[in-house]
Image (spheres, coloured by chain):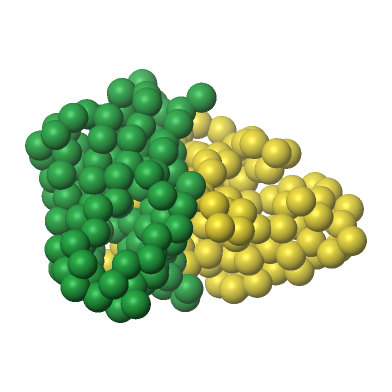
Amino acid sequence: DVKVTQSSRYLVKRTGEKVFLECVQDMDHENMFWYRQDPGLGLRLIYFSYDVKMKEKGDIPEGYSVSREKKERFSLILESASTNQTSMYLCASSSPLGGRTEAFFGQGTRLTVV
Amino acid sequence: AQSVAQPEDQVNVAEGNPLTVKCTYSVSGNPYLFWYVQYPNRGLQFLLKYITGDNLVKGSYGFEAEFNKSQTSFHLKKPSALVSDSALYFCAVAAGPGAGNNRKLIWGLGTSLAVNP
C-alpha cells in the first residue's frame, strides 16, 4: 500500500516563527502536493511538485514556500507564521504513469498559530 | 471556468437505506473524475475514479458512481448505508492538458454524510 507520512499530527506555533511541515511518500511518486483545508472552503492547493527541485505555485502560495531535494520528501515552509495560517495541512502524492492517477494523502497536520 | 459542485452540504440517511451524494462538474474536454472520503481528523482516502470506459464505476467499501456525460454528473451511491459510512465526501475533477498528473484537480467543497442507526 502507498504510504504518505506527515511528520506531525498536531502542531502549535507562535506568530512569527518559521514552521516546517514534512511529508514523505514511499511509492516513488513523481508528483507531490500540499493543500490546506478549511471549513467551507474545501481543499486549496498551496504548491505542487512534479519532480525533484521542481515546483509550481498553486492557488494560495502567499506566505509559503516548499522544498523538494529528494523524490520522496516534500517540505512546506511557513516563513513567518501568522494566525490566518491556522489550518489543516494535507500532503498528497500521485503518479501520472500506469493509469494510477489518483492521489494518496497523508493523515494531515493540524497547525495552530497563536 | 472549470468547476465542481456538490450541491448538498449535508446528507442524512437511515442505516440500511440507499445513499446518494451528488456531484456535478463543468470542464473543457474529457474529465477525470474522483471521489474521496475523509473521516474525522484524518487525511483523504481514494474511493473510486472514472477516466474512460464503463460509465458505472465500482470502488472501495461498496461504493459506486455513475458518470453521466449529458448531465455532467458523477453521483456517488451505495445500495445500503452503514453507520461507519458517516464521513465527509469530496468530489474532484481534472481535465485538459495535465489532467493525468492531477495538477489541475478541482475540488468540490465536500458533503457531510450522516448515517443514522
Query: How many numbered discs?
Result: 0
From the viewer's perspective, is A99 left or right of B59?
A: left
Inspect this view and state whether residue B24 appears.
Answer: yes
Between A7 and A58, the one nearer to me in the picture: A7
Q: Quadrant of residue B107?
A: bottom left
Residue at screen point 49% across, 39% down: B50
Residue at 81% x, 51% y: name it.
B82
Q: Quadrant of the C terminus of chain B?
A: bottom right
What is the x, y in percent for residue B64? 66, 42
Figure quadrant of the N terminus of chain B = bottom left
Q: Is residue B101 above or below residue A43?
A: above
Q: Which of the two residues, B79 or B68, is positioned nearer the viewer here?
A: B79
Q: What is the x, y in percent for residue B22?
A: 60, 62
The chain coloured green is: A
- The structure residue drawn at horizontal position 70% and vertical position 39%, both measured from the top left corner, is B61
Query: Where in the figure is residue B57, as x and y percent of width and height?
Result: 60, 37
Q: Is residue A64 left or right of residue A84?
A: left
Residue A112, compared with residue A25, is above or below; it is below
Q: Colour of chain B?
A: yellow
